[in-house]
């Protein structure tokens, strides 16, 4: 898969994982696991990129005597998910065009 396409898909997946409630790294990986496998190093790279692009914010809170970073989606992050949904319609249309010969066999 094209690396830029995959990168964009993973960004949206992470945003979707925190859309309904704030979450932290390990929980995000667990929530995504049934759909996609992601290493911690990949996740934290994505989280940092999303934070820098202001699609999420980060707060630190104590949990079990340790500090934990919680991630919160911003309006920009929600807009990105909505843009993805619109983009996906176009991608599906292209896919149907490319594979139309496959269905006629």
Image (cartoon, helix red, strand yellow):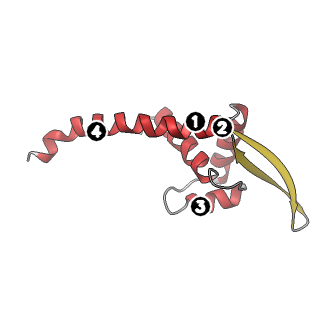
Label 1 residue SS: helix
Q: Which of the 4 image quadrants contains residue 2?
A: top left
Q: Position of residue 56 (x, y in %)?
A: 70, 41
In this rendering, the answer to whether 29 lies above or below 14 is: below
Horizontal side of residue 28 vs 61, given as left or right = left
Mark 3 crowdedness (10 Å alpha carbons): few <14, some 14-19, many ≥20: some
Quadrant holding the N terminus: top left
Q: Which residue position is annotated with label 1?
A: 79
Q: CA distance from mark 1 to mark 3?
A: 21 Å
Q: Which residue position is annotated with label 2?
A: 75
Q: Position of residue 11 (x, y in %)?
A: 57, 41
Of tags 2 and 4, the one toward the viewer is: 2
Label 3 residue SS: helix
Q: Residue at (23%, 36%) from the top-left corner? A: 98
Sequence-earlier tag: 1 or 4: 1
The answer to whether mark 2 and mark 4 are in CB contact below 8 A is no
Q: Which residue position is annotated with label 4?
A: 95
Of tags 1 and 3, the one toward the viewer is: 1
Q: CA distance from mark 4 to mark 3?
A: 28 Å
């Amino acid at each position: 898969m094209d690396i830029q396409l995959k990168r964009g898909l993973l960004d949206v997946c992470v945003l979707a994982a925190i859309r309904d409630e704030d979450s932290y790294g390990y929980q995000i990986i667990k929530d995504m696991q049934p759909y996609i496998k992601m290493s911690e190093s990949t996740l934290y790279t994505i989280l940092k990129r999303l934070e820098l692009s202001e699609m999420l914010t980060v707060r630190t809170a104590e949990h079990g005597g340790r500090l934990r970073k919680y991630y919160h989606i911003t309006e920009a992050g929600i807009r990105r998910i909505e843009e993805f949904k619109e983009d996906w319609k176009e991608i599906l249309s292209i896919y149907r065009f490319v594979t139309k010969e496959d269905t006629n066999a």
